[in-house]
Amino acid sequence: LKTSEAAELRARLRAVRHTVLVLSGKGGVGKSTFSALLAHGLAADETKQVALLDIDICGPSIPKMMGLEGEQVHQSGSGWSPVYVEENLGVMSVGFLLSSPDDAVIWRGPKKNGLIKQFLRDVDWGEVDYLIVDTPPGTSDEHLSIVQYLSATHIDGAVIVTTPQEVSLQDVRKEINFCRKVKLPIIGVVENMSGFVCPKCKNESQIFPPTTGGAEKMCQNLNVSLLGKVPLDPQIGKSCDRGQSFLAEAPESPATLSYRNIIQSESENHCANESPRFRALLQYAKGLNRLVLLCHK
Amino acid sequence: MMNLKGNPELTPKNLMRPLKNYGIACMSMGFLIEETAPVVWRGLMVMSAVEKLLRQVDWGELDYLVIDMPPGTGDVQLSVSQNIPIAGAVIVSTPQDVALLDAHKGAEMFRKVHVPVLGLVQNMSVFQCPKCKHETHIFGSDGVRELAKTLGLDILGDVPLHINIRETCDSGQPVVISQPQSDAAKAYLKIAMEIVRRLPRPPA
């Protein structure tokens, strides 16, 4: 990033208090579903302003999940306007730039990176308490770019979504290593599709059995928090396909309870404390740390 | 999933020798790096790696080369489609709308790069409770059939959610080999036959 570009991004994102990246190793584990529900869950508090940025350029699922298919982006003097689901929940995705939701975006890395930079630089997010960034699966251009561009501001951390089976966990270990390499704090791991309760006889089946201990054991081994486990509920997929909030449509579901616990735990424990005194203390500690490192050199 | 581990050897001509199990030659980035090492590369490097995995391998005579692609319509998909002759593409999707949206984009991409789409596979279509046999369509039902109709494509087959598919994959004993008489294995074998039927016949 050029210094001028970094300055531009810093200015634009100055009013964003907390940023959370949602990552997954594999596709199809429920990362976008989680991002959408996390955004809805946080926006349930009407005093908070929530923004959801979808940087999955090739497979943007967020417009459909938020019931915003067919919406277009409007430009104003202050930049691109996000599409609002609620008064306090704004969304941006490449999906809003396509003439049809079926249009394929067949771009190589540099073009995708350019659009991601534009999303951060040109969208007029306004004052935002929580910026949730939904990413494509894996560890490629989009992930490198978003971490690089957001280094102009502060990222609270990443949430990694997985299913319980070993082939999925293998990729989560890689994601965790990626986060550590680029110095991205890991807020924790969410284990999705964790068990299915038959609606008829209530028998619980482990469709994706955790034969190697699931996310729980992996988190213990790698010293990472397990934020929660979300069971399979056919209603989740249905709500997403219809662009409705599953949390609102099925408040009694065990999956809803899991989501609410995860969201609460994230906003309470993992986003940096707001108190100015704590912030000052943090700055002092960082300064001290830098001084110590300099002395060691 | 194929129960293979280790680095490939090099032939005297400096080609990589594919690892073999169950009579199938395999090549993957997974054989060239440590299991937990992430590959955090930009598109250009990924393309160069894909080239090596395709061309710098001593495949020998092959009747079928199956390429497992990552999700999306980006660098890897473009490079593979544009640089090697492909007999056909098979698109796998679960029945829910958000997954089908991406399957549709995949089909559109193949159309643009003139790769024939042999058909769609509906995966995780239905789950049968092992206790009471009640069937639940966890990810919706028949979405793939509707997409196939819209795009004028064939459905090559349906794979239900069977716990033993996942279990056998995780243990490196694909269900088609370890439990060939199971419903799951039969579903895959049927799809394989449909694919072969649609491929051009080799020259006499």
Image: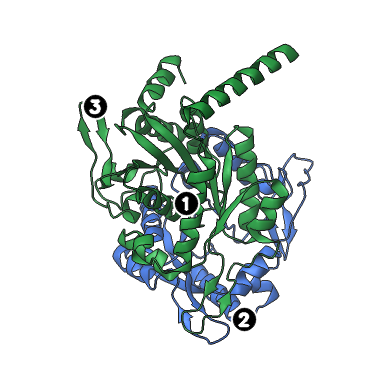
* Numbered disc 2: secondary structure: loop
Q: Is residue B1 visible?
A: no
Query: Closer to us: mark 1 or mark 3?
Result: 1
Label 3 sits on a secondary structure element that is loop
Q: Which chain is green?
A: A
Q: Which residue lies at the image location 37% right of the left edge and 22% below the top edge? A: A11
Amino acid type assigned to the residue bearing label 3 in the image:
Ser
The type of residue carrying mark 1 is Ile
Q: Quadrant of residue A76?
A: top left
Query: Could you tell me which residue is drawn at 39 percent across and 37 percent down?
Result: A129
Q: Amino acid at mark 2?
A: Ser
Tag 1–tag 2 contact (CB < 8 Å): no
Which residue is under mark 1? A263
Q: Are marks 3 and 2 on the same chain?
A: no
- Chain letter of disc 3 in the image: A
The reply to whether dot 3 and dot 2 touch (C-beta < 8 Å) is: no
Q: Mark 2 — residue?
A: B182
Chain painted blue: B
Towards the viewer: A113 or A206: A206
For disc 3, the neighbor class at 10 Å (few under 14, some 14 to 19, many from 20) is few
Q: Are marks 1 and 3 in contact (CB under 8 Å)?
A: no
Front in this rendered view, residue A8 or A60: A8
Percent across and percent down for residue B145 are 36, 71
